[in-house]
Image (cartoon, helix red, strand yellow):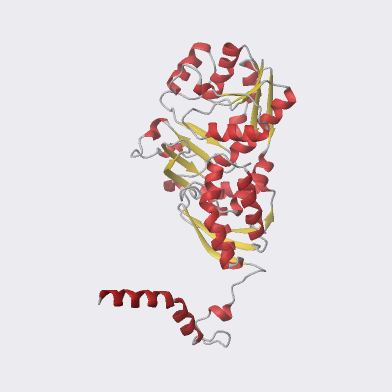
Amino acid sequence: MKVVLAYSGGLDTSVILKWLQEEYKAKVVCFCADLGQEEELTGLDAKARKCGAVKSYIEDLREEFVRDFVFPMLQANAIYEGCYLLGTSIARPLIAKRLVEIAVAEKAEAICHGATGKGNDQVRFEITAYAMKPDIRIIAPWRLWKFKSRTDLINYCQEKKIPITVTAAKPYSMDRNLLHISFEGGILEDPWAEAPEEMSVLTQPISKTPDTDEQVTVEFKKGIPVAVNGKKLSPAKLLATLNRIGGKHGVGRVDMVENRFVGMKSRGVYETPGGTILHTAHRAMESICMDREVMHLRDSWIPKYASLIYNGFWFAPEREMLQVAITKSQENVTGEVRVKLFKGNCRVVGRRSPNSLYNPELATFEADRVYNQADAEGFIRLNALRLRVGAMARKKQAK
């Protein structure tokens, strides 16, 4: 039996690689998508082979990830439950898509992932896999094996001499890509306990950020970021640049309790410096060049669109339908936004666009010849008509 494993080299997938060989007598092909994990990928190929993998794929998907997944999501201003910029969620459909493609190429009988039976990732991986290949066989060890906790896994690794970096003293899990890094589990399971400062990876703790602000200009073309401070950059390099700049100022750190798709609440700590800058700048760009009714209609879709991504339905027809409308809404979202970064804050201080709908002659508080203020009286009375009729009816009923 041949199985393609979504492999990170972390605790869970290190155990799974060995477990598949013992439980299924499987030939395991490991696949790791390079989405910007950086040093986490060092030595991964050698580790996979040392632990018994017959083949190992490590593919650089950073540009595809940002261009085809992160940026379309950015155009929608997708944010889950008011806080979460969906850094982990948006990575899963790309990983799962490539996992299935490799399984087909390798003529593997099954794919395997390390998501737990309590989390969202199992749903995201498997829904995407079924959308790609309806008859795919999926092995989800956390729903099958005898292990009950990550402590059990640590003990198994020690028994089998599997090299790992997680310890019982630092058992929280991390997931990193170019958009963010997430921390869950372990010491974070108490929602009252503050996340330790040393947990920061992408963002400086506020106590260590510069005492002077920094201004950054982001250029957009049809809702897609194309340059930072006047320098044209590829999607992945642009996001990496903003991660570095935003992280230096402690921008983009979120601590939240969210509602998982499977029905439970979960606490997550997220660092999304570049994504936070882009989200803030994109909304500011839209404010100057997007039609009011188009913006309000698009905004009404944000909760649905964000939930579709969070719940694993990136390749669902309803998400694709929404994307067409969202892309249409971005046709005039072109120009530059300037933000100021300071002590964890990202504040818009300027915006300009060749497609600007902002008309100083209309907006001015000074005397103008364009807008007749007296016209507002009829506008107000017409909009108040139903309220006046309702009030008169209530007054009549009260007699």
**Side of 336 where 269 appears, left or right:** left
**Side of 384 where 231 appears, left or right:** right
Judge whether 97 appears above or below 137 on screen. Answer: below
Image-quadrant location for residue 294: bottom right
Task: Give coordinates of residue 212: x percent, y percent.
Answer: 48, 57
**Side of 204 where 124 appears, left or right:** right
The residue at the point 58 percent across, 33 percent down is 125
Task: Give coordinates of residue 3: x percent, y percent.
Answer: 65, 20
Residue extending farthest left: 399
Judge whether 390 appears above or below 67 on screen. Answer: below
Judge whether 364 appears above or below 221 on screen. Answer: below
- 363 or 399, which is in the foreground? 399
**Side of 94 where 287 appears, left or right:** left
The residue at the point 56 percent across, 15 percent down is 19
Q: Is residue 22 visible?
A: yes
- 209 or 122, which is in the foreground? 122
The quadrant of the picture occupied by the C terminus is bottom left
Q: How many marks?
A: 0
- 277 or 103, which is in the foreground? 103
The residue at the point 44 percent across, 30 percent down is 172
Task: Give coordinates of residue 331: x percent, y percent.
Answer: 67, 61
The quadrant of the picture occupied by the N terminus is top right
Image-quadrant location for residue 371: bottom right
Task: Give coordinates of residue 244: x percent, y percent.
Answer: 57, 46
Q: Is residue 34 visible?
A: no
- 224 or 125, which is in the foreground? 125
